[in-house]
Image (cartoon, rainbow, N blue to C red):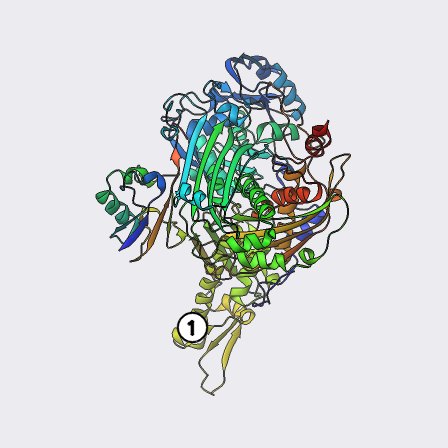
Amino acid sequence: MVTVLIPSVMRELTGGRDRVEVDGSTLRQVVNALEAQHPGTKALIIDSGMIRPEISIAVNGDIISSGLVEPVPADAEVVIVSAISGGGR
Amino acid sequence: MVTTERRYKVVGTRPIRHDGVDKVTGRAQYGADIRLPGMLYGRMLRSPHAHARIKRIDTSKAAALPGVKAVITAADFPPDEDEERVTNFGPFVVKFRWYRDNLMASDKVLYQGHAVAAVCATDQHIAEDALRLIKVEYELLPLVLDVRDAMLDDAPILQEGVKAPESMGQGADKPSNVNMHIHHEVGDVEAGFGEADVIIEREFETTMVHQGYIELQNGSAFWNKDDEVTIWTSTQGNFGMRDTTAKILQLPVSKVKVSPVEIGGGFGGKIHSYLEPIAALLSKKSGRPVKMYMSRTDVLQGTGPTCGTYDRIKIGAKKDGTIVAAEAYLAYEAGAYMGAPIMPGCMAVFAPYKIPHQRVDGYEVFVNKPRVSAYRAPGAPAAEYASECVIDELAEKLDMDPIELRLQNASVEGTTRADGYKFGIIGNVAVLEAAKNSPHYRSELTGENRGRGVASGFWFNIGQESGAIVAVNADGTVSLSLGSPDIGGTRVAIAMQLAETLGITAQDVKPQIVDTDSVGYTFVTGGSRTAFAGGWAAHEAALDVRRLLEERAAAIWECERADVAYGDDGVIRGPKDEDGKERSFTFKEIAAQLPDTGGRVTGRADTNKTSSGPAFATHIVDVEVDPETGKVEILRYTAVQDPGIAIHPSYVEGQVQGGAAQGIGMALNEEYFYDDEGHLLNSSLLDYRTPTALDLPMIETILAEVPNPGHPYGVRGVGEVPIIPPAPALHAAINNAIGVRMNKLPMSPRAILEKTILAEE
C-alpha cells in the first residue's frame, strides 16, 4: 500500500485524516484511488489533466519530475505539498 | 577551507576556468556587444505614474520622425483567444494576460516605469527623441504601496478580477489584492504552545531590494522573412526565453532561436522576459534587427526585485531549550502581478528546526510596485530573517549558546517540514558543528560596542531538465555542448564532472554554451541547480561515450563487447591477445583510432533529476557599531556551508562569499525609497547603496561536505543559501553589541539611530 500524506488544506475532504493508504503504481493511479476514497481531492491536485502548478508532490522524499506517469513503488510515501489559491494567478 | 578529504581525481581540484581568459581580457561577448548589419536601436517609453488608466496613446508624431523605423504599443501584440489562461513562462506559472501586460501595459499602468510603448530608430538618440513625441493620456488612480495597506478592505484594487481567497473567511469573494493564501499545519499548535515555558512573538519588516547585477538588461532580435526569430539576450535561461517569446508572439517554438551571450550577473533577475518579444515585434515591423538595452534607472524602476514583506513569528520552547511549537504569518508584496515567492518562504521559514507543532500562513499581495522576480533563494531570506531573529532571542532568554540551541533542535534526516516534506540526508548538524568548532567562534571578541552573532539558513535546491552533448575529437580532447548560461563558473564545474567520468583532465574538455537549436532542453540557471543537474547530464553523456568506446575497442580487438571494460582511470581494457599480452587503450589512444575505425563518436544525455539535496548554512559575524553614527562595521565574517561535494572549491567559496555579500547589503543598506505617489527616489547605484569591496572584510569560508546521495558526485547546489543567514546574524551581532533588536531591514545607520539616540530624545 502507498501512504499519501494529506496537507492540512485537504483534510476537510479526508475526514481530518492526515494520511491515507491507497493502491497504485503510478501517480495517476494513486490520485484516482485517493479520489475514490475521498471525493473532491483529485480536483485539488489535477487541473486539465495536469498536476496543478501550485502543487508539488514528493515520492519517497524526491520531488517528482514525470507528472502523473511518475512510478510509485509499493509501500512508498507520497507527500502532497499544496497552496490555497486565491481568485487569480 | 574544506573539512573533508578529496575522494576524486578531478572533482575537488581547482583548475583554471575555461572562460577565464576571455572574461578578464574583455574578449567575451555580452549582450551589449551584439552588432548586426542594418541594426536599429530600440527604446521604451515608461509610465511616470504608479497607477493610472491609459485613455489614449498617440504615436503618430514619433512614427513620422526621420530615422524612426517602427513604433509599437500593446495593441501590436498578437491577440490571444484565452488571455486569462494560466501559462508556463519558463519557470513561472502565471495568467497569460498578466505576463504580456507586464511587458507592455494594455489598459492600466500599475507601477512607475511600466512600459507603454517602444520605438526603434537608426540610432539611440533618435529613438529617445521619438519617445518624447509619444503622447499618452492617463487617468490617475489611487495607489497602494505597502503590503499591509494593500490587505485592508478599502485598499485600491490593482487587479479587478481577483477575489479574496475563500480561506480568508468573512468578506471573501470580493475584490482583493490578496492573490494567494498558503496554509501549512502539522501537529496541534495550540497544545504545543501550551507545553512551552517560554514564548516569543515578534513582528518584522523587510523592504524591496534589487539583485544588483552589474550588466544591464538587454535583448536583441531579428525577425526574418521566413517568420523565424533569432534572439540574443543576457538571460539565465535560453530555453525559457525561447518559450516565452514564442508564446507571447504566438509562434511555434521551432521558429524562435535564442543564441547565447555571456551574462554579467543575474541572481534570479534575468529569468523573466522584459525586452525580447518587444525587440522581436519592432524587428518584424521594421524588417531589420533591433537591439534594446535598459538604463540603470529602467532596471530599478521596471524590472523585478525581491519583495518587501511583513512577517510575524511566534516560537515556544521548554526551559531546557526544546522547541515545541512555532507559528508564522508571512505577507509578501507581489508588485503589480503575481510572482511573490511566498510558497518557498512558507516552506523554508522553520526548515532548519525539528518542531512538532507548526502553523504557517502566507499571503501574496498586489501593490503598485514592479512585479517582483526571483532573487537568490527567493522568499527565504525574509522568512528566515524573521524566524532566526526569534531563535536568537530565545537563546538569549534561555541563557543558552545560540549554536547549542540550534544543535539541540536541528532538523535531521526524517524531520518533517511544515509543508509535509520529509528530509533525507542533510548537513544541518555538520554545518552547526563546524561553525561551533571554527577558529572564529572559538576566538574571543572584546571591545566596546562590539558584538557577535550567528544564524542559520536553509534552501531547497532544485534539479529539473538538462541536456549535454559530448563530441570526442581525434586528438583526445572532447567538446561539451551545454544549454545552461554560465553565471558563476558552471562551465568548469560541469566539465570537471565529465572529465571525472571519462578519466581525462578538465583541460581536455572544451565546454561551450550553445543555442537552443543545438542541445536538448535545459532549464534555467537558477535554483542552485546547474552544477547538480548539468553535471549529471554531462556524467550520463560521458557514460554514453564510454559505452561507444567500449564497442569500438571490441571491434578493433575483434572480441566480445562484454569482454571490454572502460575503467574510471580512463583506460579501456580488453581480453589478452593471442600472445597473452594485456590489451588496453588510453582515452587519447582510442580517440586517435576513431576516424579510421568507423568515425568519431558523440555521447548525449537528456536528464530530469530532482534529488538535488537541500542546503544548510550557518554564518558567524563580529561587528562594531558606532553609537554616534549608527554605522555597523563588520570586523570578521565566517560562512559555513554544506555544498554536498564541492566540485571546484574555489567557485563554491566564491558563491558563498558572493551570497554573503549580497545578504549583508540586504541587511545593512539596500532599500527602495518611494514617495507617496509611488515614484522611486533612488533609481541609480549612487543612491541605491550596495556593498562594495571597501565595505566588507574577507569572508572566510568553511565547506562542511555531506555528500548528496542523490547525485553521482554528491553535489547539492551552493549558490542560494548563503544569502539567508547574514541578516539575522547581523541582527544578533548588533543586539550583542548595543542591546538593540533591529526587527526591520535594512539595519541602516539611520534605522539604528532611530532605535537608539533618536528614541532616547
Coordinates of residue B324 in the picture (x, y in percent): 46, 48
Looking at the rendered structure, the secondary structure element under dot 1 is: helix
Quarter of the image where the N terminus of chain B is located: bottom right
| Residue B77 vertical position relative to residue B740 in the rendered view, above or below | above
- Which residue is located at x 54 percent, y 13 percent? B138
> To which residue does mark 1 refer?
B555
| Residue B387 vertical position relative to residue B209 in the rendered view, above or below | below
Residue B218 in view here? yes
Amino acid at the residue labelled 1: Ala
Foreground: A34 or B123? A34
Q: Chain of mark 1?
A: B
Foreground: B624 or B189? B189
In-image side of B299 versus B355 (left or right): right
| Residue B7 vertical position relative to residue B19 in the rendered view, above or below | below
Foreground: B186 or B286? B186
Coordinates of residue B52 in the picture (x, y in percent): 52, 16
Coordinates of residue B155 in the picture (x, y in percent): 48, 19
Residue B264 in view here? no
Foreground: B168 or B480? B168
Numbered-mark total: 1
| Residue B381 vertical position relative to residue B157 in the rendered view, above or below | below
Coordinates of residue B437 in the picture (x, y in percent): 64, 60
